[in-house]
Image (tube, rainbow, N blue to C red):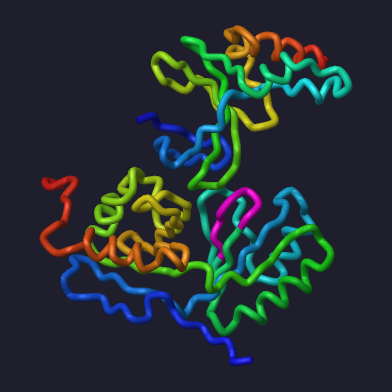
């Protein structure tokens, strides 16, 4: 059983009060270039998920509380939540620095676009 | 068309004397569901002028003004309670005041059943159906939060230290009542801190 804190309403509860919403920051290829989406890209977008040992970025919903979605960074080994952040936000800088795999690329691009 | 009239989902239920705390239904409260943008000052002041009280912005809180009680449900949603007979008038005032502001106010009086639990050990009784730490300081009087109770969705309102209202959807009222009857049976009290 893991304990979750909702960053929107501040409620604390275990995972049965919340709903896990899968991997966060998955990019939909059609959003950037709708005319040229390959079958492989679409397959990866729909079905291929990253399953790392360590830091994992995911979406959660405060299911039985305020009903809002939020993001969380969680360690899949210790099950510790490293950070909670809003559904439209990026994680804190120190967490971004630790990101690997598809998330590292995603954050890099988002940070670039921000500047 | 036959006249519509309210009938409680728990009307046939009589609280037996086999429970260690007092459990009864409150059917005289009417409810209005209000949604709107907290950042919209026009919306906030329009709601205040109709209700006479400001909408609570802080999570999991509630405010009271005379007969009107406002419970925080989410960052953009409130549940307004008042006497059942007053709902239509209050809803009219609210809609008139809100006018064309992007918002929603609906009479949901018959959507939920309210069960009031009162007495020593209400928190411990509720904790039999919940994973929340209801005896912590987070749950001081006035606290409101939605929760998972006995595997169903419920709304918790701490009225006083030993008085808690549970709001469950009408179709679950019977089940929630049965659960509470069993959970609060005399002799099954849980003493979390027997020496305190």
B60 versus B98 height, above or below:
above
A44 versus B130 height, above or below:
above
The structure residue drawn at horizontal position 66% and vertical position 24%, both measured from the top left corner, is A46
Horizontal side of B99 relative to B132 (left or right) equals right
Chief SS of the magenta region: strand
Q: Is residue B71 magenta?
A: yes
User: Is residue B159 in sight in this rendering?
Assistant: no
The structure residue drawn at horizontal position 69% and vertical position 66%, both measured from the top left corner, is B105
Q: Nearer the viewer, residue B111 or A40?
A: A40
Q: Nearer the viewer, residue A73 or B94?
A: A73
The structure residue drawn at horizontal position 30% and vertical position 62%, both measured from the top left corner, is B162
Horizontal side of B31 relative to A41 (left or right) equals left
Q: Is residue B25 magenta?
A: no
Total number of numbered discs in the rendering? 0
Which residues are drawn in magenta?
A: B70-77
Snapshot quadrant of residue B36: bottom right
Snapshot quadrant of residue A79: top left
What is the x, y in percent for residue B50? 70, 71
What is the x, y in percent for residue A99? 60, 10
């Amino acid at each position: 059983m893991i304990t979750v804190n909702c960053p929107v309403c501040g409620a604390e509860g275990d995972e049965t009060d919340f709903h896990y919403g899968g991997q966060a920051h998955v990019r939909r290829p059609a959003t950037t270039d709708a005319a040229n989406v390959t079958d492989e890209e679409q397959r990866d977008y729909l079905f291929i998920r990253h399953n790392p040992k360590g830091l994992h970025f995911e979406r959660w919903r405060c299911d039985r509380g305020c009903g809002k979605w939020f993001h969380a960074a969680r360690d899949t080994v210790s099950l510790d939540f490293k950070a909670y952040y809003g559904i439209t936000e990026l994680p804190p800088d120190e967490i971004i620095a630790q990101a690997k795999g598809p998330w590292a690329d995603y954050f890099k691009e988002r940070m670039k676009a921000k500047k | 068309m036959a006249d519509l009239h309210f009938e409680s989902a728990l009307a046939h239920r009589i609280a037996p004397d086999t429970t260690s705390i007092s459990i009864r239904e409150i059917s005289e409260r009417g409810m209005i569901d209000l949604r709107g943008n907290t950042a919209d000052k026009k919306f906030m002041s329009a709601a205040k002028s109709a209700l006479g009280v400001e909408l609570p912005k802080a999570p999991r809180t509630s405010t009271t003004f005379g007969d009107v009680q406002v419970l925080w449900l989410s960052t953009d949603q409130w549940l307004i309670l008042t006497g059942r007979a007053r709902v239509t008038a209050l809803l009219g005032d609210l809609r008139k005041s809100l006018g064309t502001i992007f918002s929603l106010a609906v009479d949901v009086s018959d959507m939920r059943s309210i069960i009031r639990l009162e007495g020593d050990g209400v928190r411990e009784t509720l904790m039999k159906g919940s994973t929340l730490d209801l005896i912590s300081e987070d749950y001081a009087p006035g606290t409101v939060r939605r929760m998972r109770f006995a595997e169903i969705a419920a709304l918790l309102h701490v009225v006083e230290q030993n008085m808690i209202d549970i709001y469950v959807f009408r179709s679950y009222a019977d089940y929630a009542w049965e659960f509470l009857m069993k959970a609060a049976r005399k002799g099954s009290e849980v003493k979390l801190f027997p020496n305190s």
